[in-house]
Image (cartoon, grey):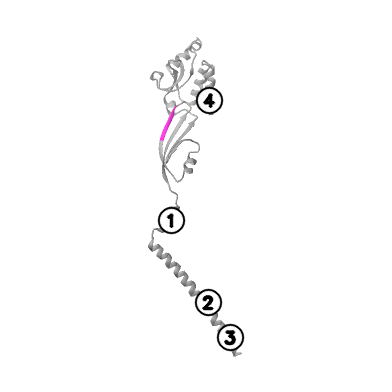
Amino acid sequence: MWNRRTNRSQSFFYGFFSAVLLILIAGGAWLTTNTIEEQKRTLNPDREQQVETVQAPVRQEVELVLTRAYICGAETEEKVTQVFSSLNEVYMEYKDWELVSNDGNQFAFKKLVPDLSPVCKENGFFGLNQDNMLTLYEGPPEDEKVIQTFFHIDTKKLASSLFERDLLLLQQGIRIHDLGEYNSILSTYGEFSDHSEYSRLTDVEHLED
C-alpha cells in the first residue's frame, strides 16, 4: 500500500517537473525571439517603413498631349500632366483614344470627334476659293483662313436663274453654327459638284459614322 502511494507521488512529481520544464523552455524561446526582433529594429529602425514603401504602388507624373480631330477638319491640342501608378492605368483612362506615340513618361493620344470644333461653331463660314472649290473658312472667305477644302462647284450650273442667289450667298460666305447646318450645306451644294468627288466625301463620312 505504501509503495503504491510512493509511486503515485513520484509520478505526480515527475509530471509536474516536466510541465514546468516545458514552460521554461517555451518561455525562453519566446524571449529569445523577441530579443532578436528588438535588436533588428534597433539596428534598422526604418525597416518597417522601407517595406511599406516598397509594397506601395509607385505613382509617377505623366505628360499627355491630347489631340481632338473634329469632323469639320479642325483639330485642337491639349497638354496636361497627370499622375498614374502604372502603364495599364494610363491606357484604361484613355481607352477610347488612339495612341499616337509613347516616349518614356510622355504620351500622345488622338480622338475623332463627330461634331464641329468650337472654332467652327463660333466662326465657321462656307465659301468658294479661287478655283471654285467649296471651302470651310475660319471667318469670312476674304480672310482666307482655310479650315478644310471639299469639292469643285459647277458655278455655271449654280448661276442659272433658279440658283443665282445660292451662288451669291456662297461667294459672300455662309455662316454655320452647328453640325446640322454643316451637313445641310454639303448636301445642298453637293448637287453642283463633280459627282465622283462628292460621292467620295459622303462615303468617308459614312465610314466615320
Q: Which x, y percent locates residue 81?
A: 40, 40
Cα distance, mark 2 to mark 1? 40 Å
Query: What residue appears at the point 54 percent right and 18 percent down from the top-left corner?
Result: 196
Looking at the picture, tell me which residue is in the foreground, 185 or 57: 57
**Amino acid type of the residue tagged 1 in the rendering:** Val
Residue topped by disc 4: 204
**Residue beneath the point at 43% across and 66% down:** 36
Residue indicated by mark 1: 51
Which residue type does callout 2 highlight?
A: Ala
Secondary structure at badge 1 equals helix
First in residue order: circle 4 vs circle 2: 2
Q: Quadrant of residue 40?
A: bottom left
To which residue does mark 2 refer? 19
Q: In the structure shown, which secondary structural element does the residue marked by tag 3 occupy?
A: helix
Q: Mark 4, residues whose alpha carbon is within 10 Å: few (<14), some, or many (≥20)?
A: few
> Which SS type dominates the magenta stretch?
strand
167 over 124 or under it: above or below: above
CA gap, disc 1 and disc 4: 56 Å
Magenta stretch in the rendered image: 74-78
Q: Where is residue 26 drawn, in percent x and y?
A: 49, 72
The residue at 42%/32% (across/down) is 77
Q: Tell me if residue 6 can be seen.
A: yes
Residue 28, position as x, y percentages in the image? 46, 72
Give how far apart the Cα atoms at labels 4 and 2 are: 90 Å
CA gap between label 4 and label 3 equals 106 Å
